[in-house]
Amino acid sequence: MIDPSGPFAAVPALALASIAILPGVLLWIRRWDPMGWCIGFLGASVATSIAALAAVVAGTATRPWFLVMAIFLYAAGLFRLLREGPLRGADPLGDRWALLGWLIIGATTLVYLYRAPVHYDPRSIWFFHASWFTSPDVAYVDLLPLPFPHPDYPPLVPSFSAFTWLFGNDRNDWIAQTTTGLLTLVAIGGLVVLLTRGIRSPGLRAVAGGLATLAVLGVIQEYGFDGHADGITAVAVATLCLVAILGDDPPLGAVAAVAAVLAKSEGAVFVLVVILPLYLLLRRSLRPLIPALVLGAGWVAAVTVAGSRGEEWHLSAIFPWSDRFLERLGAIAASLTGNAVFVAAAVLWLGAVLVSWGRRERRLSQVLIAGGAGLALLLSIVVFYLASSRDLQWHLDTSAHRLVLHPSLVLVVGAGLGFVAVLRSLSHRPETEPSPDSKPARFSP
Amino acid sequence: MRAPTIVGGFVLGILGFLALVFLYGTDLVDATSDYPRAADEYRRLQCLGDIILEQVPVDASLAVLEPDLPRPDYWKVRLREVVSPEREVVFVETDADYLVEAIEGTACDGVDLLVSAP
């Protein structure tokens, strides 16, 4: 039954689901600070999708695997706690001012959560998949040969919703919508904390965090909070870019990589064709990407073996000498670059380039690299539409505004790097003075 | 050269940021003003969904939400809706007898359900 009681129906179910799995994840990752909570919450969603993958491989119902995953997390966490002592991090809430600034801005998204969950894609794809994950006696693998509801789509969002439903009232679209929104909001928190944590002054950090959150929400809009998986995917991809550019916080990079790969197929493609080359180019360790690559390959292999039909592609259309290339390129380019969010993000990024250039900031190279990553994402989306076998105009009308979130958000993150550098130099008196809470720039152009 | 570049950069940055905030604000206002329509839509979906969910769980979200989308044969359920100024009328076409019986035995507030064979 569908419960009509609104987003508040999600509160008890979310609380119970969090108790069931989040402490286990936190014990395991052993971080007791704001970033730890972000990684833990994302990690909890990743854990449920690993359970979903295990169920597909085993060909059984998913419910028992949720239980196995929760028990494993608690056992692994307690084992590490006994072996290595108390958790690191003195303050689980961290900087109150920054937290308050972020919460005030984030609370505006409650409007989205209060809107009835009526969108077609979330209900017919993501919530629908979740209803199969919660079934006590039906295996998700049985859904895979069906043509429509895209059962081959990755499981992160529906498996997390399904796990929460187990503590509610079976299928409940309000809970699923709220769960997805909360996941996106927490991921935005991780991204913003990482972006602004070099600013020494708590007041400036709170202001910068609030402004950055607003800019990110300007890109994501409702797509992170109405049950779509695009918001969480875009935030995960942007976080990965930021982790790669800063060379900082591999645990966040690892969990963001898995989230990107297991949230949407586009996320997996972006990790392969943009993030992986970015890591190689910047000579970062590839270790944080390995779990994502293994799990992503595992999901694709499992659904393919189980009989998923997948998509048809016209790969020849991606070459300039193809007739389809010339026919389609103009419409694709106009649709993507004419998008208001993309234009605004590009203007913001260009401003950061000019400011960083004029101030001779060391971070100019980082802003430019983020711009390059955004451009690479945009080009990969162009290739995706060139090779699509669907009617182009229909495909653009129904998905371009969501796909363009990814390059737009990376541009916003690049702009954030530039403007945060300015705020850092305002809050650090002498440039040469060592900062106890900021790491030295590891990237040299 | 440096000062105009910095000023220009800040101007562009502020413009881009304000544009994003404007887009976010507009989207939030749309979501707020859309709420009554969405709530009505949800009540209708809930009513129809509840009827069909009890009979054909697999079909619930598909059949109710996308009336014009061709259904896979094995679901054998198709809904076509006509919204009149006075009253919403939903036509259900199905060759599943048990579903016809289930729908005929139920009524949604403000919605007429007419069932026929395809």
Image (cartoon, coloured by chain):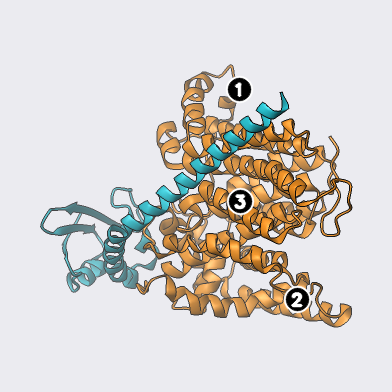
Q: Badge 2 is on which residue?
A: A27
Upstream in the sequence, badge 3 or badge 1? 3
Query: Compared with residue B52, is residue A211 higher up or lower down, i.e. above or below?
Result: above
Identify the subunit bearing mark 2: A
Q: Is residue B19 left or right of residue B53?
A: right
Write down the quadrant of residue A387 in the picture.
top right
At horizontal 60% and vertical 39% (from top left) the residue drawn is A407
Write down the quadrant of residue B7 in the picture.
top right
Identify the subunit bearing mark 1: A
Kind of residue indicated by mark 1: Phe
Q: Residue A22 at x, y = what percent?
A: 65, 74
Q: Badge 1 is on which residue?
A: A319
Label 2: element kind = helix
In front of the other: A383 or A349: A349
Q: Residue A421 at x, y = what percent?
A: 74, 44
At horizontal 71% and vertical 64% (from top left) the residue drawn is A35
Q: Which mark is residue B52?
A: none
For the C terminus of chain A, which image quadrant? top right
Identify the subunit bearing mark 3: A
Q: Is residue B110 left or right of residue A135?
A: left
| Colour applied to chain A | orange
